[in-house]
Amino acid sequence: MEFSLSSTFAGGPSFFFRDRGAPWPWARVSERSEATVFESESFTLTVRDGANSLDAGALEVAWRWGGRAGQWRPGDMDTQNLGGPFSALDVLSREIVAEGVHEFDPLDGHDAHRCSTHEVHQALQRAILAGTGRFPVNGETMEELRRFAAGEPSRRLKRWPEGFRRALARVRRFPPGFLTRGGLTVIRDTGPLWDREKNWITPRPGGHVDITFIACGDDYRGTLGEIARLSGPPPLLPRFALGVWFSCYRRMGQRAFERLADSFDQHDLPLDMVVVDTDWHRGFWHGFDWNRRLFPDPPAFFAMLRERGIHCTFNVHPCHIPATDFKAAEFRRRTGSTAPVLTEATAPHPFFAGCFRADLMNPAEAEAYFDVFHRPVTEMGCDFWWIDGAMEHWDGREATAWLNHLYFEHVRGGSDRPVAFSRASGLGCHRTTLAFSGDTLSQWEVLGQAVEMTVRAANSLVVHWSHDIGGFAKGDPSWKQNRPPAELYLRWVQFGCLSPVMRFHSDHGVREPWRFGRRTLALAREALQLRMRLLPLFEALNREAHETGVGPWRPMCYDWPQEEEAFRRWRQAMIGDGLLFAPVMAPQGWVEVWFPPGRWTHFQTRAVTAGPCIKRWRAELSEIPLFVREGWALDLAPAARRSRDIP
């Protein structure tokens, strides 16, 4: 449905909804007391004639589906939303814990409720900058946040800023997703329209409201499938992306990656992907000049990886180009760009000083940006790009979904399974993006939030979700090095081995399994080998997600919507139709699992539990709480170090 004050309607595709489908087959249209009534088997829409605003008196939607029925009017809040993902969990800590889901006015649009835990730190950074005249150094905002949580006064601010309090309130609950217990999904599309001829976005008319209604009842899978049909499916990941990844933000060059690959092989550990972080740049975060001290021979680096059967993705902070980059002049000649070089005074952050911006809303600049800077690296062997950071939105806000689309299209030119590796943000990101969690702390509380984020992300079609195994940064500033306790590390590895994507990452940290002692290495090896033995299952679930919109991880309420307990269990999930997984998220192995109706066999011990029931126990360090549903067969592949070696 569209509402327009000018009575001109778009009617066609938007950036989010690429396919509107055929006109709705209304069984009956009638006039009734200054209103027009549209009726079908599932819907009755009553529209007031001559309405010049979209309010409760202008529209009423009555729906019927799956034995349920209800009504909706503009202004009605969704108080039963099942939640969706944050844009990222950047700098998440035990001081920032989300519980439940925000109440949601669908007419605000889902994008209006997007948020990241990083917003809390950005608010503190802005306040400290305004008060001291300098950007805070690393750790200062974390210290301030800890002081606020402890009820202590700030060391750098006279009072806690209101913007910080608002940002903190936003991340105390999960943002809304597409699914709701209310039975009617309402999606306001606030993004731009889509020009099929130009294959580009175009502005949405002002005073224009675009709403989609889906009567779903309890059919959550069907709702996701319908949204995926209208907006496009989640990407079909290449097989190697379902294997084991290793990444670390530290100075790693050709020789370091070669030693890393050899060490994985020597310890009989699988490895399919490496992530090349910022140090491949000659500059700090930006640019496309190679750091020749670390990568003296880039073609030889890619040849070394290919010889070992290892794939790679490269980090890029998009849009900002160092003025000293050796191809900057070529880009300016080709595009006619006159963008000024930023200084510390004009840059959004000192890291961007010395750069000028590429306008990726401009088709000519976007084309040149990828041709001049990215294509040479892509053609050498970069499988896809790790998009770090974001850019301005078409309405003044972040445009990560558009950015991911551009990188997806760039990779599509040389791959039959393109993907963008980025934060999950904005309507439309689901069809291009393999998401990463952002920079989190190594803490038990953060592990629990990462589990819940993975489960709730499925409600927004963000089905390919990855997290930093072990956490990104020190969980406690007193740690001498960024090395989590062995128990926390191993439980994160066990969670990771059954996640949609398994990826190690840290900030100059210790995450290699062989650096945690013999016992941890042996148990981590079991987890990584389990991942590879389950790879055919994850490949099948990858294809199912692409075809149906239903991800590898499914909230318990998808299969048991009549069970009230299913709506309380956001830290356990079904993996496909046959596996129940409840990661250990607390020290000493404490775990609590709700078993739905039926019989469930422990994957390791073969003990059988009859549901419905709740059980709490202490899991041995070697135990992964994974259970097989009665009547479901689990075929395991032979152990392998590379996904290419699995039939």
Image: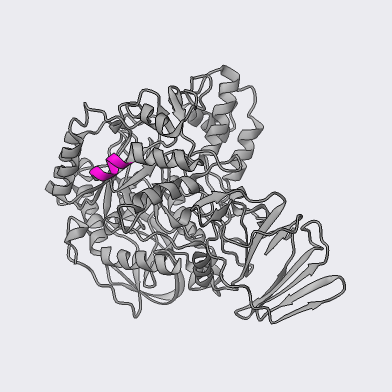
Q: Is residue 108 left or right of residue 311?
A: right
Residue 96 visible in the shown view: yes
Q: Tell whether position 359 is magenta.
A: no
Q: x, y percentage for residue 377?
A: 28, 40
The answer to whether residue 160 is above or below residue 630 is: above
Near-viewer residue (437 or 54): 54
Q: x, y percentage for residue 141?
A: 51, 29
Q: Tell whether position 378 is magenta.
A: yes
Residue farthest toward the top in the current orientation of the protein: 133
Near-viewer residue (214 or 16): 16
Residue 506 visible in the shown view: no
Residue found at x 41% / y 42%: 367
Q: x, y percentage for residue 208?
A: 70, 54
Q: Is residue 457 left or right of residue 508?
A: right
Q: Quadrant of the C terminus?
A: bottom left
Residue farthest toward the right in the current orientation of the protein: 33
Q: Which residues are magenta?
A: 375-380
The answer to whether residue 480 is above or below residue 29 is: above
Q: Quadrant of the N terminus?
A: bottom right
Residue found at x 16% / y 34%: 255
Residue found at x 18% / y 30%: 296
Q: Main secondary structure of the magenta part?
A: helix
Residue found at x 79% / y 56%: 53
The quarter of the displayed image where residue 515 is located:
top left
The answer to whether residue 376 is above or below residue 610 is: above
Near-viewer residue (452 or 186): 186
Q: Is residue 70 left or right of residue 605?
A: right
The quarter of the displayed image where residue 527 is located:
bottom left
Q: Is residue 608 left or right of residue 15?
A: left
The answer to whether residue 302 is above or below residue 229 is: above
Near-viewer residue (65 or 375): 375
